[in-house]
Amino acid sequence: MTRNIWIYILISFVVSYLIRVLPLTLIRKPIHNKFIKSFLYYVPYITLTVMTFPAIVQATQIPVAGIAALVFGIVVAFFGGGLFSVASVCCVVVFLLEWFLV
């Protein structure tokens, strides 16, 4: 059974195009529903979390080091740490745990 790659490319194009065009054509008025506004507000954060969390755990030699770095990073961010300080703490935690546990 031969498969034509142009069919796959066409389907990918149509799906990508519809995802971008349908909201522009169907939603022309401002959204007043609080639930939908809240949902649309948090979608980028959820997407970033879904993409980042597996990478945090799998990028280290020991998954426990990645999880510990995530916990320490959340704590530092909760207490007002900026991006540089959170990233630095996470790197140090992973480095130390992998150095001591491996």
Image: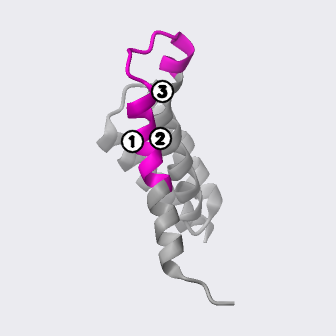
| Mark 3 or mark 2, earlier in chain | 3
Image point 47% across, 45% down: which residue? 19
| Mark 2 or mark 1, earlier in chain | 2
Give the main secondary structure, helix, strand or loop, of the magenta stretch. Answer: helix
Local secondary structure at mark 1: helix
| Mark 1 or mark 3, earlier in chain | 3
In the foreground, 44 or 32? 32
Residue closest to the far right: 1
Q: Magenta residues?
A: 15-38
Inspect the magenta stretch and tell me whether residue 28 lies in it.
yes
Image point 50% across, 51% down: which residue? 52
Query: Which residue position holds label 2?
Result: 73
Q: Quadrant of the N terminus?
A: bottom right
In the foreground, 46 or 66? 46
In the foreground, 99 or 61? 61
User: Percent from the top left, x then y, of residue 76?
Assistant: 44, 34
Residue neighbourhood size for the residue with mark 1, other residues' Cα within 10 Å, grouped as few (<14), some (14–19), many (≥20): many
Give me the C-alpha separation between circle 1 and circle 3: 27 Å
Residue neighbourhood size for the residue with mark 2, other residues' Cα within 10 Å, grouped as few (<14), some (14–19), many (≥20): many
